[in-house]
Image (tube, coloured by chain):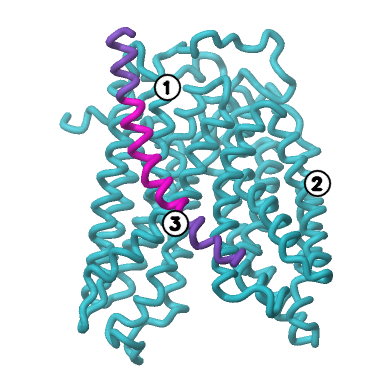
Chain colours: A purple, B cyan
Amino acid sequence: MSDDASGNGLKLVLAWGFVGIPLAWGVIQTLINALKLFQ
Amino acid sequence: MALSFLDKKHSIAPPGYSRWLIPPAALCVHLCIGQAYAFSVFNLPMTKLLGITQSTPDDWKLTDLGWIFSLGIFFLGVSAALLGRWVEEGGPRQAMFTAALCWSGGFVLSAIGVYIHNLWVIYFGYGILGGFGLGIGYISPVSTLIKWFPDRPGMATGMAIMGFGGGAFIASPLSVWLMPQFTTATHVGVAETFLVMGAIYFCFMMVGSAIVRIPPPGWKPEGFVPAAEPKKLVTTQNVFVYDALKTPQFWLIWWVLCLNVTAGIGVLGQASAMSQEMFPGQVTAAAAAGFVGLMSLFNMGGRFFWASTSDFIGRKNTYFIFFALGTVLYAAVPYTGAIGSVPLFVICYAVIFSMYGGGFATVPAYLRDMFGTRYVGAIHGLLLTAWSMAGIFGPVLVNYIREYNITHGVEKAQAYNVTMYVMAVLLVIGFLCNLSLKAVHERHHMKLEEAEDFI
């Protein structure tokens, strides 16, 4: 893998993790609340 | 100049820059401004700032606090319409930076307003300044994403606008967790929560502003070959932002968005009460809250799903599905109440809300198909006035019809039936508007030299 590609790969992981982790946390919190509908 | 790094020419991507870094840049902004949907978590604590455990006569009323969100959404539409051209010509980095300043500045002013207990400061802070942050932030990444993803414009803008729907998922539990951290026996920790959230949002949005890049002139994704024969409803030309207003296409899409949003937003605000009143004894308050959360998830997921699907089936066909399927589902909701089927009711609403979100997310690509890429962000900004109108029409329509029915002796369980049929009729009108859409006449196209990006 070239330096350019590996550098881009790291940036992509960091950038997507930066937005994806908080979003996933929020979605999980909402899903937990939504489950009350089926209890 | 110290701020020259914000210029369009300083944000051109270097060779090899991955276009997949642009959606997270856009999400950095949209996830933050999506907090607006979760502002209501502050309403109750803000009615007890003086009384702490219960409201005193000098505390703010819920009706007064409701104006904060309304002002924010109103100024979202105003700023997007007024500043769309500036956003387009100044580039995404400058726009995201400005949005970060306005949005986080709105939180800081609101914290001051809470601290000195002056609601006007919050109206100005969150409502006006924050509203400008909302509007500028909402449209800032649109044309950049479309330029980076000429092969998948719907998916690209769908990802960003999905973030606006998802922002509330983060903001709501975060606010609920932060407030008790600053709350004592003699103090409600709203001001501190505003300050912390303002700081977090500023940092988050600045990351987006730092990552975002515009593609070099003439850039195309590897292996992308534009269609040899352009599709009838996908232009290769550009229309100047204010010339778009002179076309029937702009106003037809304006009504398409307005009617789709009116139907969705009207029942969105009433979803909790509606589920409990249509199924008395079956849906409790806690279950209704779960139902609202589930609908928000479909609203968010629909933004990505439908906008991505539109890249394959076309924008016009996507809206045909929204309006045709929406009409059937709205008309079917009273039947689910009549037979007492909660699962069927939930399925109907899940699809309805996915299409409500999908309507928002698919419209930038629809505008790009009609008016070209050059001013799509600015034209999108003008179109958001349809959202502001729908934000007034939808809830008023639902509330008025419900009240009218109840005062005329209709049982609560059936009070929403007429509303659903009215919404179905609105969608039929939307269907006809969408059906009338044809390609923009070439007299509205910009000349080649006018259309070229200046960098």
- Camera-side residue: B247 or B339? B339
- Marks 2/3 same chain: no
**Residue at x 75%, y 72% (from the top left corner):** B416
User: The residue tagged with tag 3: helix, strand or loop?
Assistant: helix
Q: Is residue B21 magenta?
A: no
Q: Is residue B252 visible?
A: yes
User: The residue tagged with tag 2: helix, strand or loop?
Assistant: helix
Q: Give me the disc on residue A29.
A: 3
x then y, percent, for residue B217 = 42, 13
Q: Which residues are magenta?
A: A11-28
Which SS does the magenta portion mostly show? helix
The residue to which callout 1 is attached is B19
Q: Chain of mark 2?
A: B
Q: Give me the disc on residue B324.
A: 2
> Furthest residue to the front?
A39
Q: Quadrant of the N terminus of chain B?
A: top left
Report how far apart the C-alphas of labels 2 and 1 lie in the structure. Answer: 35 Å
Q: Residues within 10 Å of mark 1 (few under 14, many from 20)?
A: some
- Marks 3/1 same chain: no
**Residue at x 73%, y 34% (from the top left corner):** B316
Q: Chain of mark 3?
A: A
Amino acid type of the residue that numbered disc 2 sits on in the rendered structure: Ala
Q: Is residue B254 left or right of residue B165?
A: right
Mark 2 or 1 closer to N-term? 1
